[in-house]
Image (tube, grey):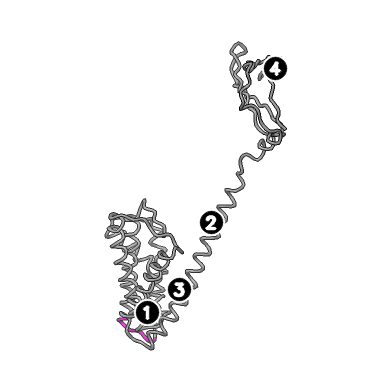
Amino acid sequence: MISAVKQPSTTAFAVNDITRTGLFALRRKISLPPLPASTPPSLLCSSSRLSLKPLCVSSSRKVVGSRDEELQFRCEAYEADRSENVSVPAEEPQSSAAQKVKIGIYFATWWALNVVFNIYNKKVLNAFPFPWLTSTLSLACGSLMMLLSWAIRIAESPKTDLDFWKSLFPVAVAHTIGHVAATVSMSKVAVSFTHIIKSGEPAFSVLVSRFLLGETFPVSVYWSLLPIIGGCALAAVTELNFNMIGFMGAMISNLAFVFRNIFSKRGMKGKSVSG
C-alpha cells in the first residue's frame, strides 16, 4: 500500500524546563516551518517500511549564573529502543581480567615447556655429547617453526624495518651465547646444578647495571642479593660432581642473558612488533 505523508501548516511542541532555583517554570513553544506545497516523490514510501518505533524528545539546558541570561536548549529525536545501554563500561573489567588470565596461561605454558626441554636436552646430551651442535640445532628448529607459522598464517608475520634489525641483532647474539653456554654447562654437570647457578642472574644484572651502565640502586636491593649469592656459593661448594667447565658455562650464560635483557630494554624501547 502506498501512502503519502502530509504535513500540516505548522507543527509545534512544548519543552518544559525548570531553572536551577526551582522558583518558576519556563514553557517554550517552538514552531517548525511547513513543508512546501508540492510534496516530492521521495516522501512517498511503502507502509511496510515505516518505522513504528516511538520517538523520544530530549532537551539539555545550559546552567547559567543568573535568571536574566538566556537558556539554551538542544532537542534531539531518537528511537526508544536505542535510548538505553548506550555505553557498556562493564566490558573493560572483563577484558582486563581476560588479559591477566591469558598472560598467566603464557607463563604456565613457558614454564612447563622449559621443564620438558631441560629433561630431554639432558637425555640427548648423555647419548650425543656434542653441546655446540645440539644447541645450534635447537635454535635452528625454533627458527624453522616460526617461519612455517608465518608461511601458513598461524601467526602474523612481523612488519619490520632496518632500524629494528639493528636493534635486534645484539639481542640475538647475546641470547645465542647464553643458550649455547647453558647447553655446554648441562653437558658437564647436573641440570639442577646448572639452574642453581643460573638463579644468580639477578645479581649479575645489578652488578652490570651498576658498574658498566652507572645505574644506582637502593641499599635494600644489594642486601636482597646476599641470599642469592650465598645459595649459589653453597651449591657450588657442596656439589659432588663439580666441573669447572659446567660452572663457567652457567656463569657465562648468566652474563649473556643479562646483556640480552639490557640490549632488549634499550634497543626495543618504543617498538611493538607482532608475530
Q: Which residue is mark 1?
A: 236
Q: Which residue is mark 4?
A: 8
Q: Which residue is mark 2?
A: 99
Alpha-carbon span between mark 4 and mark 2 = 58 Å
- For the residues bearing labels 2 and 3, Cβ distance under 8 angstroms: no
Alpha-carbon span between mark 2 and mark 1 = 40 Å
Q: Could you tell which of marks 4 and 2 lies nearer the N-terminus?
A: 4
Q: Nearer the viewer, residue 74 or 171?
A: 74
- For the residues bearing labels 1 and 4, Cβ distance under 8 angstroms: no
- Using the image, determine if residue 66 lies above or below residue 40: above
The amino acid type, in three-letter code, at marker 3 is Asn
Q: From the top left corner, tell me how far across and down residue 258 is, in percent.
A: 34, 65
The amino acid type, in three-letter code, at marker 2 is Gln
Q: Could you tell which of marks 3 and 4 lies nearer the N-terminus?
A: 4
Q: Which residue is mark 3?
A: 114
Q: From the top left corner, tell me how far across and down residue 31 is, in percent.
A: 65, 15
Does 51 sit left or right of 159 as displayed? right
